Image (cartoon, rainbow, N blue to C red):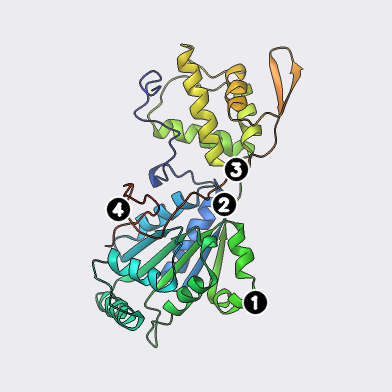
Amino acid sequence: MFSRYFGLDEDPFGSTPDPRWLYSSPTHQEALASLMYGYYTNRGFTALIAPPGLGKTTLLFRFLDDIRTSARTVFLFDAFCEPLELISYMLRDLGIVPGRNGIEMREQLKDILVKEARAGRRFVVVIDEAQNMSDDALEMVRLLTNFETPRAKLMQIVLSGQPKLSDKLMMPSLEQLRQRISTFCRLEPLSAEQTAAYIGHRLKRAGYAGPQLFTEDALKLLTDASHGIPRTINNLCFNALTLTCALRRKQVDVGIAAEAIADQQLTPELKQASPGAPEIVTKPKVESEEPERSGRAVKPWAVASRPLCYWWPSR
């Protein structure tokens, strides 16, 4: 591991959606502000849309961290389930044995919502990778927001997903759900300047205090190859630092950056731009977020027998 070699407290380019590492680019700041606004105004539905790898889940965990003192929350990841199973998972995460049928489960959920409302706490459900939900499951999500008083909604829901979710919500069959979504938040790839700032932010957060770790030419190559996608930036920087450590060097130069990019198969062709500085022509790497998953929830950062769903603890 290169952390000790470079004097780091921990790996700055890890793959877990830890909110401590969130880089607040303008688009991430705007999306977080929109999520918080939707929460405080109790609008019922908010949607977060972004391509894979831009940090949706990390942003959602930051949002949940910010509201945990005033809300009871449930986080479902990639809920491949039938409509009633969705309610069942929520109840189990709340420490309640689900009833025998849909009527009983709805009553159980209503009792929880009323109890939280009387205690002055909001109830928030976040569903990540919602583009994979069936139309029937999404319709059940819409019906859940019918729990309300004359003054306020008893449940707030955040739907997060890839652009396919936006396409899905435009379907005529989901028009009623789309009409209830008051705010659409979107994330965009980082610019070249933001990519360099992102790398610096991660290194500083990991405790790096030495000289510049990436040369300017190396940063440019990594920026061009990553297309501003944080997940790709993390992978490239991790591999570049690993190579640098293996070669017993103290700085990532353009050659090491080029090799790290090639190892990620982001270099369909290489051209010599100038002596000692290869120009790398890259194409976006198509990433998939389609592993086998379930709507079952687990404790944060833990992996159960079906490691397919994160859950932010109810508060």
Which residue is found at the position 35% from the left and 61% from the top? 67
Please tell me which of labels 2 and 4 falls first in the chain: 2
Q: In terms of depth relative to the viewer, which is nearer, 52 or 13?
A: 52
First of labels 3, 1 by sequence position: 1
Residue 27 shows which numbered tag?
A: 2
Say whether disc 3 or disc 2 marks the residue closer to the N-terminus. Answer: 2
Query: How far separated are the C-alphas under marks 3 and 2?
Result: 9 Å
- Secondary element at image label 4: loop
Residue 299 circle label? 4
The vertical placement of 46 against 161, above or below, is below
Which of pointers 2 and 1 indicates the residue nearer the eye?
1
Task: Measure the alpha-carbon separation of dots 3 and 1.
Answer: 33 Å
Mark before the other along the chain sequence, 2 or 1: 2
Residue type for callout 4: Lys
Residue 43 showing in the rendered view = no
Q: Which mark is residue 144?
A: none
Return the mark for residue 190: 3
Tell me how far mark 3 sits from mark 4, CA to CA: 31 Å
Mark 1 to mark 4: distance in Å? 36 Å
How many angstroms separate mark 2 from mark 1 (CA)? 29 Å
